[in-house]
Image: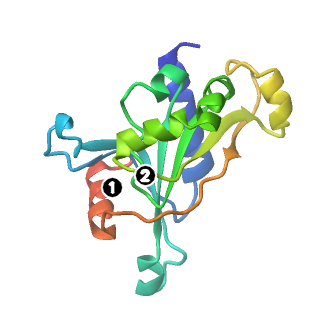
Amino acid sequence: MNRRNRTKFLGDLLVREKFSGFGKYWAREVSIDPFHSKESGLSKRVDFMQFIPPGQSTVSAIEKGIFVCYEVKSCREDVFSGNGLNFIGEKNYIVTTMQCYKEILEDYRNGTLDEHVKKMNGKKRSYGILVAMPSGADPYEEMKNPTLLESECKWELKTMIQCYECYREKSMTELLFCMLRSGKN
């Protein structure tokens, strides 16, 4: 499977796993500060952004909502390309394949990936890693022998590295507006 098809596969899986159903608020290709030049470092685009309020029947519940950013990365080169990894939510995830996860695991362990995330965001940001694998598969067995994405099986995203909530710098109003402007598709 080529890089473009892997990216599409991962994006479709993310939509199916995390955004399907009632009460899901999300957008694809969310532009933040789009009127700044890319060179300024202020203009960013997040692959997928989700807003998760703890309730929807009161203003206070909505105001306690958090934003989760997802960056789809199909290979190690994509992770370190300098595009993406725009982590501006309280939670942030890299969504990838098992093969890519295996390739970046040492970078994660030795701090290279953290330094790259810091460079992309101007500061250290909390992030986790979600990996596509067959439903019910043992993650450690998958690491030894990853299933090909072309395989006819049911796929799911599993958390290989947990993301811990951090603070965001953008206001809820601004991020909701950016999501609204981007739309879902």
What residue do we see at 65% from left, 37% from top? 109
Real-space CA distance between mark 1 and mark 2, rounded to the nearest whole angstrom: 7 Å
Label 1–label 2 contact, CB within 8 A = yes
Left or right of residue 94, residue 122 in this image: left
Q: Is residue 150 left or right of residue 184?
A: right
- Residue farthest to the front? 110
Q: Identify the residue under disc 2.
A: 49
Q: Quadrant of the N terminus?
A: top right
Residue extending farthest to the top is 2
x, y percentage for residue 140? 83, 33
Residue 12 x/y as whole percent: 54, 36
Q: Earlier in the sequence, mark 1 or mark 2?
A: 2
The residue labelled by disc 1 is 179
Is residue 182 visible in the rendered image? The answer is yes
Q: Residues within 10 Å of mark 1 (few under 14, many from 20)?
A: many
Mark 2 is surrounded, within 10 Å at the Cα level, by few (under 14), some (14 to 19) or many (20 or more) other residues, namely many
Asked if residue 11 shows in the view, the reply is no
Q: Nearer the viewer, residue 36 or 179?
A: 36
Percent coordinates x, y for residue 99 in the rendering:
67, 22
Q: Position of residue 168 (x, y in %)?
A: 39, 63
Q: Which mark is residue 66?
A: none
Colouring style = rainbow
Q: Quadrant of residue 15?
A: top right
Amino acid on which disc 1 is placed: Met
Secondary structure beneath label 1: helix
Q: Is residue 144 left or right of residue 86?
A: right
Identify which amino acid the numbered label 2 is placed on.
Met
- Position of residue 133 relative to residue 76, above or below, is below
Instruction: State which quarter of the image contains the C terminus.
Output: top left
Q: Nearer the viewer, residue 35 or 122?
A: 122
Quarter location, residue 173: bottom left
Q: Residue at x 29, y 43 (%)?
A: 44
